Amino acid sequence: MPRREARVKPRTVTVLALLPVLGAALSGCGSSAPAATGPGAGTSGTAAATTVAEGLNTPWGVARLPGGALMVGSRDTGRILRIDPKTGARTDVGTVPGVDAFVEGGLLGLAVGPNGRLYAYYTATDDNRIVSFAYDPSRPTGAQLTDPRAVLTGIPKGDNHDGGRLAFGPDGLLYVGTGETGRSGLAQDRDSLGGKILRITPDGAPAPGNPFPGSPVYSLGHRNVQGLAWDSQGRLWASEFGQNTWDELNLIEPGANYGWPVVEGKAGRSGYTDPVVQWRPVDASPSGIAYADGAIWMAGLRGQRLWRIPLNGDGTAGTPTAVLDHTAGRLRTVVAEPDGTLLVTTSNTDGRGDPRPGDDRILRFRPS
């Protein structure tokens, strides 16, 4: 079965302060020890986060502008806000037209390209697609997105597993995480864009050097890719929803097959690439990832925590630990800031969370 998963004064949220308030809400939410495989996997739950912005409606995609401001998209409304992460001040940039928001679809990933255009992955009437816009802050509020251009269309659409993460790599090319929309066979079909990581030029053409000539497919055998990030060695990592057994963090190699639906998690089966780390869904249901401080940081939706996965030089990982453990609810997107802090969005207004006063939020977390 598919698993579905203004100006703000900074405010500190700590685990210890929230425990009395959250006790009832955490009942039955999987607050036992994490099930990441490997010896010593555990939690570190006394870290604090400050609130950068609050009162957000279903935030999903976040893109950082060159000056540091954030573009934050609302999955359900298609609206994009520009938010200053230092003050929380926000501007209504505009609304992406044609967004069909339902279940897991809507306005999903955002990315700023090397050409300065804003890229948006969204669910339309007939498909999931990527469109780019010029951003002109001199125009009136609500009308700052202009010159829409279709980049890639025909990505399969479904009630769930719509993928949606966008990220420009160190090579200046656009990487796209897609889902198999609940039709698991698409993940193994090289002619389908579903259940893949795609690699395309900023104009939407298959990138030169892709493993399958003339195809945007970079890797296959994915169920629902949710996070993309590069480490200090330029290696690509991706987080992925499993079904009922294992969620995954994968080291992505061009042309590799990550197994879905033939295998889930570590199988050691010839022809398929195993994840580097796997988790039980109750402890992860992973979404966005970022690289900082020698580690991948992975947001957990159902797991309601931020996982730190230290990376080794040989492509293996150390023992995962968790912070922000059940302090802010479901976590969706992680952005690494130049000062070493992390920006993390909550996802409690998406129909599957338990919204609290002020939700949804952008939190700032400083790794200790």
Image: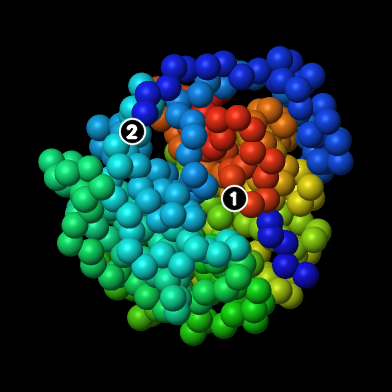
101 sits left or right of 118 in the view:
right
Badge 2 marks a residue whose secondary structure is: strand
Which quadrant of the rendered structure holds the C terminus? top right
Q: Nearer the viewer, residue 108 or 277?
A: 108
Q: Quadrant of residue 268?
A: bottom right
Vertical relation: 157 (above or below) 225 = below
Vertical relation: 112 (above or below) 357 = below
**Residue drawn at (48%, 54%), measured in percent from left and top?**
75
Which amino acid, by three-letter code, is at mark 2?
Arg
Q: State the residue lying farthest toward the left.
A: 138
Residue indicated by mark 1 = 350
* Residue 360 pos. (x, y %): 54, 37
**Residue drawn at (45%, 79%), measured in percent from left and top?**
126
**Rounded to the nearest whole Å, what is the CA distance between mark 2 and mark 1?**
21 Å
Which quadrant of the rendered structure holds the N terminus? bottom right
Vertical relation: 38 (above or below) 201 = above
Which amino acid, by three-letter code, is at mark 1?
Asp
